[in-house]
Amino acid sequence: MEIKDMATAKDQEKRLKIRSPFNQSISFDMIDVESDILKNISYTGIGIDISEHGLGMTSDYAFKKAQVVKLHLPLQEMDRPFSVFAEVMWSMPAKSHFRTGLRFLQLNISNFGIDI
């Protein structure tokens, strides 16, 4: 991963809302556009914290800043995962995995009656 793709700790401090703990397994999908063939790729990660505007998580995947992913969040209020698109705001190595901060796109999940 190149330095320009990783954010600094100052980027992490620009949150709009305080996040609550969210220790849940998360699946996410994205389209691989760097290869000659477009393909849908699925991964999993572990949530760290969440707010109505974004999510912190860890995974084995090295995200790039501004990458868009489709998250599938397990929420108690719903029988099935809640899917939402999110933009990678920052990502950095953390021991044997990567820690990533994501901003939900075009969504404020408090509008859906979901408690964070």
Image (cartoon, rainbow, N blue to C red):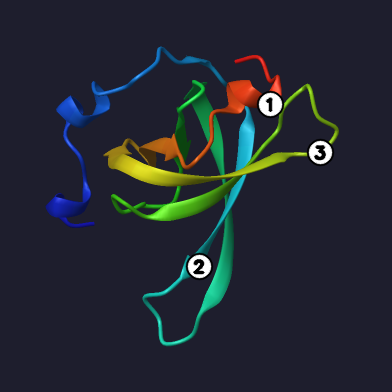
Q: Label 3 vs label 1: CA separation? A: 14 Å
Q: Is mark 3 in CB contact (under 8 Å) with mark 2? A: no
Q: Amino acid at mark 1?
A: Phe
> Which corner quadrant holds the N terminus?
bottom left
Q: Position of residue 58 (x, y in %)?
A: 45, 36
Mark positioned earlier in the residue sequence (3 or 2): 2
Find out whether the residues at labels 3 and 1 contact each other: C-beta distance under 8 Å: no
* Mark 3 element type: loop
Which residue is at 16% across, 26% downward? Answer: 10
Read off the residue under disc 2. Answer: 31
Mark seen at residue 112: 1
Give how far apart the Cα atoms at labels 2 and 1 are: 27 Å
Residue 71 picture quarter: top right
Look at the numbered disc 2 and give the secondary structure of its residue: strand
Indicate whether 20 appears above or below 10: above
Disc 3 residue crowd, few under 14, some 14–19, many 20+, Cα 10 Å:
few
Q: In the rendering, at what x and y percent does residue 31 appear?
A: 50, 67
Q: Quadrant of residue 93?
A: top left
Q: Is residue 1 above or below residue 104?
A: below
Secondary structure of the residue carrying numbered label 1: helix
Chain-order first, disc 3 or disc 1: 3
Q: Which residue is mark 3?
A: 80
